[in-house]
Amino acid sequence: MHIQNRLPAFSSTPRVSAQKKDNNQPKELDEKNFSWLDLGKGVTGSLIGGAIEGVGIGASSLVRSPQVAFHAVKGLWKSKMLGPVLKATLTPVVITAGLAAPVFAALGGTLFGMFEGFKEGAEKSPLAVPGAALKTVSEFHNKWAGQAVEGVQNLANQEPQSSDQVYEIRLIEAGKGLIAGAAGAAVTGAGVAASSVVNLPGAYLRGNQEIWKSEAALPLKVGGTLLATGAAVVAVPFAAVGGALWGLGSGAYHGYKDGLLPAIGDAAKDVKTFHQSVSEAIQKD
């Protein structure tokens, strides 16, 4: 009987090869076996990612926001769907939003970069974080902001099917819209900021309670608390700028449509809704 000269099926050789192949893959974050070394790499990565993406996305927005605002204003005046008074009303709203956008983008980029950097640093190495962070900044600059410009240009090229599809407002409505936009930005920005200050301690405490009740390893719990602390520092200004931007657009719309006082009332309702939603989310089991 002839026995073939080959390894049996239970040989460990293929397993060694597969193990080597797996070792070449980045380690996924293991909550239960997360080490103090992983924590150090994650925290370092978080600092690097937050700095690069906060500065990078903020700088990109300094370039992109004027471009988006320029094309938006150009599209407004080119559009055949809007009347001249409505175009004149929307122009300062768009410009103001463009001025505030870089601050909002920088704060959001910092938050995102902190969490992305922690994950990249812990799973791979802090040395891998700059590349991932720069990729995110590049995507923001070339893809997301670029799509915003394209979207504005597409809207500007739309043709009305009839005169009924041309939107226009009266001059007095334009004045009410502009005043209400400024008032809405002030009310919503300040209100959302105040709500964030009130809710932040409860949210921070609740978040940390959930972290420390989990079955994650002690170093990962410490890392979660550090990330929550960093996020808490950025949360209030981020919410304030976001609220102001929302109030600007919402106030301008409700101002020319319903009047100044109803628009301010709607801004106050938006703040109340935000506050209740956050409070309920904190208290929810």
Image (cartoon, grey):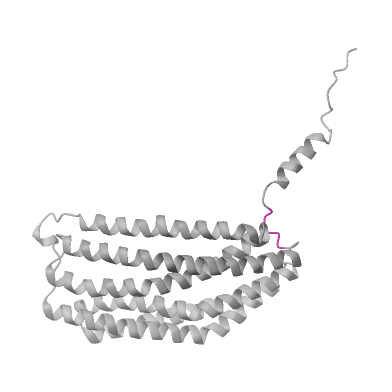
Q: Could you tell me residue 118's position as x and y percent?
A: 62, 65
Left or right, residue 275 beside residue 283: left
Describe residue 206's horizontal placement relative to residue 145 as left or right.
Answer: right
Q: Residue visible at 46% across and 71% down?
A: 106
Q: Is residue 208 above or below residue 59?
A: below
Q: Residue furthest top?
A: 1
Tell me where residue 60 appears, x and y as whole percent: 42, 64
Residue 266 in the magenta stretch? The answer is no
Q: Is residue 207 left or right of residue 263?
A: right
Q: Residue at x 50, y 87 (%)?
A: 198
| Total number of numbered discs in the rendering | 0
Position in image of residue 222 (x %, y %): 70, 73
Give, as a single range, the part of the protein colored magenta.
27-31
Residue occupying the point 13% across, 81% down? 172
Quarter of the image that includes the N terminus:
top right
Nearest the viewer among 97 and 186 is: 97
- Magenta: predominant secondary structure element? loop
